[in-house]
Amino acid sequence: MPHKEKAKTPNTDPIAANGGEPGITREHWGSRIGLVLAMAGNAVGLGNFLRFPAKAAANGGGAFMIPYFIAFLILGIPLMWIEWGVGRYGGSIGHGTMPGVMHRIVKSPIAKYLGVLSIVLGLLTAVYYSYIESWTLSFSYFSVTGRYNEIPGSDMVEKRKEMGRFFKEYLGVREKLKITRAATVQEIAAVSECTNASEVPSLLKYDAARDGEWNPYDSRLDQSKRPFTEIPLRNKFFQNNSTAYIFFFLTFALNFYFLYRGLSAGIEQLGKIGMPILFIFAIILAIRVLTMGRPEGCNWSVIDGMNFLWVPKFDQLGNAAVWLAAAGQIFFTLSLGQGAIQAYASYLSNKDDVVLTGLSTASLNEFAEVILGGSIAIPAAVAFFGPAVTTDIARSGAFDLGFQCMPLIFTKITAGWFFGAIWFGLLFIAGITSSVALLTPPITFLKDEMKFSHGKAVAAVSAITIIFSHACVFFFEQGLVDEMDYWVGTFGLVVYALLEVIVFMWIFGGENAWKEIHKGCDMKIPRVFYYIMRYLTPLYILGLLFAWGIQDGWGILVMQGIPVENRPYIWACRVGMLAVTALFLHFIWKRFHDDDKDSYWLPTVLWGYPLLILIASYPGLLGIDTNGLLLLAVSWSAVLILCIYVIYRMCTIPPRRHDDFPEETETADKPAT
Ligand code: PHE
């Protein structure tokens, strides 16, 4: 039986019931069902209902599902067990995040600093994730108040455009009008609804194709000579993003409330109440969509939608992009590689099973994603817009599908306000149960390692999140959300997952890990998974990183395709992410440097070096100096070599502090009899 703890008394549990070091006091989950629901809440998120349908449709529907299931088997399930295992093991020695676990089992002093990823990835993801979550709350409110019912337009195509404008203006982004020929200021003033022509010049953007790249820093600018390409239109639905801002604060206040109440009384309660409601909402919506048939005046039906998603297209299997997208989705949806599952699992005791419970969480997530998530947005969109337009919609991103098409569909069905409210309500619950999970690793770190009180840890982490979220709220248009999503929500988590596999399955030792996972288990894992976890999973991840690097890593690094004027913002965003990392590296140093006799240069190198590169690359990225790009290439290769060296060192130096399985350390790699 899991240890029952009193609500609101975090950190005071006197029992080291986890079988770990004496004197370690940690909170625990209240009950098994509470744990499963909290973990399911962690995994089931916006990824299930927004990201999955969009990714599946954008990658050819049926073509996506085969690589998706393979990734679930080779990456999803094994990594789930590894994270539960590392998490519970860490908890038993008083460390809910990776720096402490690394310090304990890896000899090299550098290792624990790499564990910083388990803290900052979740924190930085929460920075933009909680903002997106707040949109769902406001759109739920708009559904009830009928705010988007009167979207103008004679048909669905026109309405979709207007709904796009509604959504953009909500975010504080002005709709732009493309001008295809040179026009006078007066002509433009007329179409852009400016009050007078004198407003126009300040709104202009210039044609890159005709005049070469021009940016606001270019002193050669001659305003009068250049033809215009796009001009922002006057706002129609929202004057600015103040509504979004208010809802963001409301959302964050709710996150803060549940986090502040603590593990059992806050997060677990949220899962216990939220998850059943979420499933009921999703089932109602899925039934509503699946019984829609062929909507009046439309050429397609929901059956076409189901076919679109489920008829396998084997000819697409050779396309690497589809495999990458599928694997990325598995990581994101199962909350893997962010330290979030690990932090939750650190509050288990050795008597709690992780094999079956971990598998249940993964299965519940897949049920929510494939069965429910797959039966709502895509079939509805195909019925109303047809498969070709749906693919287009999905390619333009999950937000188009969720915040533009779905509301329009709700305006077309009876009691649409109700279905709209539960669609966005469902997204909100999915979002909040995940955002509290994203913030748990940094909170756990501050409590475990820095001995912060619960309240102080929650307040500190919330303050950092709120400050950084402002960048997303006010510079959404400059692409900050996409930028962060790439580094922490797509790339970073794969890197961290690789680190986890190496640490647990190789340094801790395959057999030790296998035993650790099986402590208190209700079910044995088939032995074949031992080999998958040890060999196939890390190889698969390496392959992914390699393919990503080749496919889009370089382009993203040098900000290809990002308008020149947005690059400083993106650059600043990277510096900001690095600053948060530096802060936590400092904390890690502070906590552990005495044990390892570390000098301060170790953590400093880890953040200082990328910072130097960022500084050096600044003018180059603005398109002024190509030498900057060269420097960037050289420097980043050096970082890569440094990382490989560190991993090599970690693997070759035998563990020093690893005393939990003394008799096993020598023979860790030999299979058990
Ligand atoms: N799994 C969540 C989703 O599907 C996102 C998430 C990632 C949550 C990592 C916690 C940690 O939306």
Image (spheres, grey):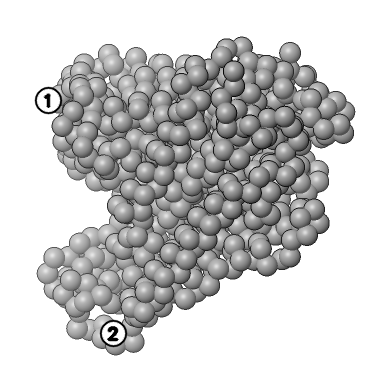
Dot 2 corresponds to which residue?
Answer: 221
Question: Relative to residue 241, is residue 536 depicted above or below?
Answer: above
Q: Quadrant of the N terminus?
A: top right
Q: Amino acid at mark 1?
A: Asn
Callout 1 secondary element: loop
Residue 299 is marked as: 1
The answer as to whether callout 2 falls within 8 Å of ligand 1 is no
Q: Secondary structure at mark 2?
A: loop
Q: Quadrant of the C terminus?
A: top right
Q: Residues within 10 Å of mark 2 (few under 14, many from 20)?
A: few
For the question of whether residue 518 can be seen, the reply is yes
Residue for point 18% across, 28% down: 314
- Whole-percent x, y for residue 554 in the image: 34, 60
Residue under the image location 53 percent in, 57 percent down: 645
Q: Nearer the viewer, residue 123 or 313?
A: 313
Q: Nearer the viewer, residue 68 or 475?
A: 68
Q: Count of labels shown?
A: 2
Q: Quadrant of residue 84?
A: top right
Q: Note whether 663 is above or below 107 in the view shown.
A: above
Contact, CB < 8 Å: mark 2 with mark 1? no
Please state which amino acid type lies under the numbered disc 2: Leu
x and y percentages locating residue 23 in the rendered image: 87, 33
Q: Position of residue 536 (x, y in %)?
A: 42, 33
